[in-house]
């Protein structure tokens, strides 16, 4: 089943149809896939598998390992053990060179899409590992922060507040909630604590395609934007900076860093809108428990 919505051109990203009207008004037609129960079952499986890759890699994320070793271990686990496809490998949305690795590893001031390489992790680093697998044609997308040894108080605070920000957003998910309510909740919380929210990257619908509509902005105004409906599946994945929100892209064409080189953190879950609220699909044995404020 498909629903069609009209949306502001500015917010368009992947896979939107752009329509130019006579009156010179630009409209974007969004296609949001409402998942049926068979599709939801497959998304649950893909979500669990993505989360299990993070469980698998956890004991290896120690000072002395390089991010490309982490990539190789995850790649082999996905391909050989899980028989999943690492969705990032060769992923090439318009305008991008194909992504060269199977996972993203974003260290310290790297915000997202960090390309694994020879960089060796050291005591005090914080690293986001972002996993997307494809199983039976469906995607599961999740990321966690890893703290190596004993990071600074600020780094620990950034990681835990970003986790809470994601969960504050997740808790808003239920039919009738508007996307602006989710964005506002996350932005307000981050900014109250003196941090900033990255604007250029956002959560996204997910299913048979990696990035579907709608976009889930991590900032916004309450009572604005699309209303959620049961059967929608999307990610919530706030990127929060200790300093200013401005970003810079590295020459590799993928890795995004903070312009002021301040630390950045991110957590990500794939979430289903249910009749009464939400179901987090990216859970497995070692998924960190939700914050205390979640019932
Ligand atoms: N997993 C990322 C997300 O959460 C997307 C990574 S795209 C890649 O949307 F090509 F950089 F891998
Ligand atoms: Co995502
Ligand atoms: Co991701």
Image: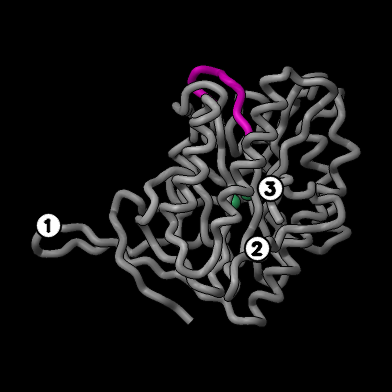
The answer to whether residue 218 shows anywhere in this view is: yes
Please name the residue that numbered disc 3 is placed on.
293
- Residue at the image position 56 percent from the left and 50 percent from the top: 169
- Was residue 174 drawn as part of the magenta stretch in this picture? no
- Residue at the image position 52 percent from the left and 56 percent from the top: 204
Please name the residue that numbered disc 1 is placed on.
24
Q: Residues within 10 Å of mark 2 (few under 14, many from 20)?
A: many
Left or right of 238? Residue 284 is right
- Residue at the image position 44 percent from the left and 38 percent from the top: 199
Left or right of 179? Residue 82 is right
N-terminal-most mark, 2 or 3: 2
Residue 95, given in percent of the width and then of the height, sits at 43, 45
The boundaries of the magenta stretch are 258-265
Residue 225, given in percent of the width and then of the height, sits at 37, 58
N-terminal-most mark, 3 or 1: 1
- Residue at the image position 72 percent from the left and 45 percent from the top: 291
Q: Nearer the viewer, residue 34 or 82?
A: 34
Residue 242, compared with residue 190, is above or below; it is: above
Disc 3 or disc 1, which is closer to the eye?
A: 3
Left or right of 224? Residue 45 is right
Please state the total of marks drawn on the protein image. Answer: 3
Please name the residue that numbered disc 2 is placed on.
139
Give the quadrant of the C terminus: bottom right
- Was residue 262 drawn as part of the magenta stretch in this picture? yes
Q: Residue furthest left?
A: 23
Q: Residues within 10 Å of mark 3 (few under 14, many from 20)?
A: few
- Helix, strand or loop at disc 2? strand
Separation of marks 2 and 1 at Cα, in angstroms: 37 Å
Residue 135, compared with residue 161, is above or below; it is: below
Ligand 2 within 8 Å of the CB at mark 2? no
N-terminal-most mark, 2 or 1: 1
Separation of marks 2 and 3 at Cα, in angstroms: 29 Å
């Amino acid at each position: 089943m498909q629903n069609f919505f009209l949306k502001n051109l500015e917010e368009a990203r992947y896979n939107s149809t752009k329509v130019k009207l006579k009156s010179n008004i630009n409209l974007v037609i969004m296609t949001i896939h409402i998942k049926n129960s068979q599709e939801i079952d497959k998304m649950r499986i893909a979500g669990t598998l993505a989360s299990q890759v993070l469980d698998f890699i956890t004991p290896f994320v120690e000072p002395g390992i390089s991010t490309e070793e982490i990539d190789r271990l995850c790649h082999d686990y996905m391909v050989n053990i899980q028989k999943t496809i690492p969705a990032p490998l060769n992923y090439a949305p318009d305008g991008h060179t194909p992504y060269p690795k199977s996972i993203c590893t974003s260290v310290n001031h790297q915000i997202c899409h960090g390309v694994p390489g020879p960089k060796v992790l050291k005591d005090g680093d914080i690293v986001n590992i972002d996993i997307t697998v494809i199983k039976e044609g469906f995607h599961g997308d999740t990321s966690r922060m890893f703290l190596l040894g004993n990071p600074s108080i600020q780094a620990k605070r950034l990681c835990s507040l970003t986790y809470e920000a994601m969960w504050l957003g997740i808790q808003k998910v239920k039919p009738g909630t508007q996307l602006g309510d989710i964005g506002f909740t996350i932005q307000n919380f981050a900014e109250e604590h003196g941090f900033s929210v990255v604007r250029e990257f956002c959560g996204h619908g997910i299913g048979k395609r990696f990035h579907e509509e709608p976009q889930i902005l991590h900032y916004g105004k309450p009572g604005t934007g699309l209303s959620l409906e049961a059967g929608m599946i999307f990610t919530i994945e706030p990127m929060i900076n200790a300093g200013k929100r401005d970003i810079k892209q590295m020459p590799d064409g993928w890795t995004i860093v903070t312009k002021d080189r301040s630390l950045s953190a991110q957590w990500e879950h794939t979430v289903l809108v249910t009749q009464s609220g939400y179901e987090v699909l990216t859970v497995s044995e070692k998924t960190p428990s939700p914050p205390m404020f979640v019932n």
